[in-house]
Image (cartoon, rainbow, N blue to C red):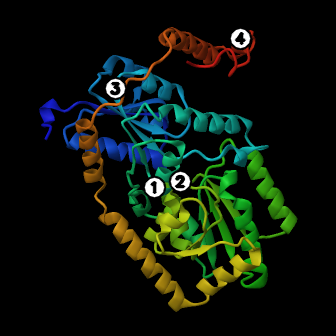
């Protein structure tokens, strides 16, 4: 067993550390576990949410701390300059795959994200022979890694923290929505793969056919997806469906209040690598009804209610069956409690540390080759990026299209 005094550094590298998102929360939890176990551990990023910047280091600092015996935990979601630096360094690597949404979901909505998702999935292939182990944060993601050709894969399970839902709820929202009328809730980013338009159609059918007093609460950031948000407003107007409340990105107190007033969590998402909000619904003890796609069935693990047909009348009938039958609702919540208890029983820290030890004791991957001029090209790219940020008009005047002759190494 390696002693704390001789342990190598185990650093994390990712493109961005976001406040309150699943990847950011996992990175912080991993760092805490590693430091408690005696591993030197920092988080290297390109960008971080302002509140988290003091907890991170610039990804370029990786070059100075790199050691062949160090281990990089590389959170791969989209390709990035931080990813390419990690690839070129001699440190051992454990890749943690959070899944990349297929680019076709963003066609006609966000052209930059189409390109990034396509490039990210393509770039992932370069790591097949670079990492000592590839981890999915769900079995669905592990299977995708296996399909990509990674020879060594495993699962580092997501064990979400629900501390943010223990804050006192926003009393203003409670007073507005806790009035006996049924509230249907969806929580998640307002992006096309979540199929929020389907949630609205299902709610419309439920309201027309079963419960005219029902309300729909949609909670989640729409930053960068204003055109998709506009299409949702257009759908609401076309259907003439009242009582749809799009709340956007909210505080923890408001999110807690939304779960407290909700009678049912409804998801129509078609692509999820795990989907933490489903577990938030379990934690807040409201029945969860979700479309059986991607990782969702595995995440729900036999609890909640899954549906396979997106006929609005069918889903509306499911919602009515759940909310009009107190005994059934109680049984659904009880089963969700069992799954959540089983999830909490998983020892995330022990799994993480065991994985680190296994990689330390396993043979190294053969070294990968990088272009001889990689570091020169990297320096040139950094200077171009500085120009892009400080003088965007001058950058656009350069004689190449960004993403063409100015690609990063």
> Is 178 situated left or right of 395 in this image?
left
Q: Which mark is residue 323?
A: none
In whole angstroms, how far apart are the C-alphas of marks 1 and 4? 44 Å
Q: Position of residue 276 (x, y in %)?
A: 49, 58
Earlier sequence position, callout 1 versus callout 4: 1
Q: Nearer the viewer, residue 324 or 133?
A: 133
Residue 273's disc is 2
Residue of label 3: 91
How far apart are the alpha carbons under marks 2 and 3? 27 Å
Q: Secondary structure at mark 1?
A: loop
Q: Looking at the image, which is closer to me, 195 or 55?
A: 195
Q: From the viewer's perspective, is residue 102 above or below residue 179? A: above
In the shown orientation, is residue 363 left or right of residue 179?
Answer: left
Q: Using the numbered discs, state the Cα–Cα distance from disc 4 to disc 3 in whole angstroms.
A: 37 Å
Residue sticking out furthest to the right: 238
- Residue under label 1: 138
Label 2 crowding class (10 Å Cα cut-off): few <14, some 14-19, many 20+?
many
Mark 3 lies on a secondary structure that is loop
Q: Dot 2: what SS?
A: loop
Instruction: State the image quarter where residue 51 is shown.
Output: top left
* Labelled pair 1, 4 in contact (Cβ < 8 Å): no
Label annotation for residue 394: 4
Residue 151's x, y, as percent?
43, 42
């Amino acid at each position: 067993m390696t002693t704390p005094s001789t342990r190598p550094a185990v650093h994390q590298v990712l493109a961005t550390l976001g406040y309150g998102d699943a990847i950011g929360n996992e990175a912080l939890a991993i760092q805490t576990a590693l430091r408690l176990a005696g591993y030197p551990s920092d988080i290297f990023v390109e960008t971080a949410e302002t509140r988290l910047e003091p907890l991170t280091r610039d990804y370029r600092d990786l070059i100075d701390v790199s050691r062949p015996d160090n281990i990089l935990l590389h959170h791969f979601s989209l390709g990035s300059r931080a990813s390419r630096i990690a690839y070129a360094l001699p440190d051992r690597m454990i890749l943690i795959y959070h899944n990349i949404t297929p680019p076709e979901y963003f066609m006609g909505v966000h052209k930059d994200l189409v390109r990034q998702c396509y490039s990210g999935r393509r770039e992932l292939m370069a790591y097949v022979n670079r990492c000592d182990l590839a981890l999915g944060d769900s079995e669905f993601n592990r299977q995708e890694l296996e399909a990509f050709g990674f020879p060594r894969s495993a699962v580092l399970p997501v064990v979400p923290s629900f501390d943010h839902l223990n804050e006192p709820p926003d009393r203003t929202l409670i007073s507005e929505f806790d009035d006996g009328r049924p509230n249907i809730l969806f929580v998640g980013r307002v992006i096309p793969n979540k199929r929020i338009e389907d949630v609205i159609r299902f709610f419309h059918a439920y309201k027309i056919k079963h419960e005219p007093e029902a309300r729909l609460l949609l909670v989640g950031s729409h930053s960068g997806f204003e055109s998709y948000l506009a299409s949702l407003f257009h759908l609401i107007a076309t259907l003439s469906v009242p009582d749809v409340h799009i709340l956007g990105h909210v505080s923890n107190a408001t999110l807690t209040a939304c779960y407290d007033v909700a009678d049912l969590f409804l998801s129509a998402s078609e692509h999820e690598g795990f989907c933490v909000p489903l577990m938030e619904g379990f934690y807040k003890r409201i029945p969860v009804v979700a479309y059986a796609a991607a990782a969702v069935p595995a995440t729900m693990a036999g609890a909640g209610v899954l549906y396979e047909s997106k006929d609005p009348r069918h889903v509306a009938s499911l919602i009515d069956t759940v909310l009009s039958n107190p005994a059934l609702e109680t049984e659904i919540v009880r089963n969700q409690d069992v799954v959540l208890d089983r999830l909490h029983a998983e020892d995330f820290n022990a799994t993480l540390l065991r994985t680190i030890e296994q990689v330390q004791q396993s043979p190294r991957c053969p070294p990968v080759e990088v272009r001889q001029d990689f570091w020169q090209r990297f320096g040139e790219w950094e200077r171009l990026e500085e120009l892009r940020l400080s003088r965007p008009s001058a950058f656009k005047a350069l004689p190449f299209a960004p993403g063409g002759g100015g690609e990063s190494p």
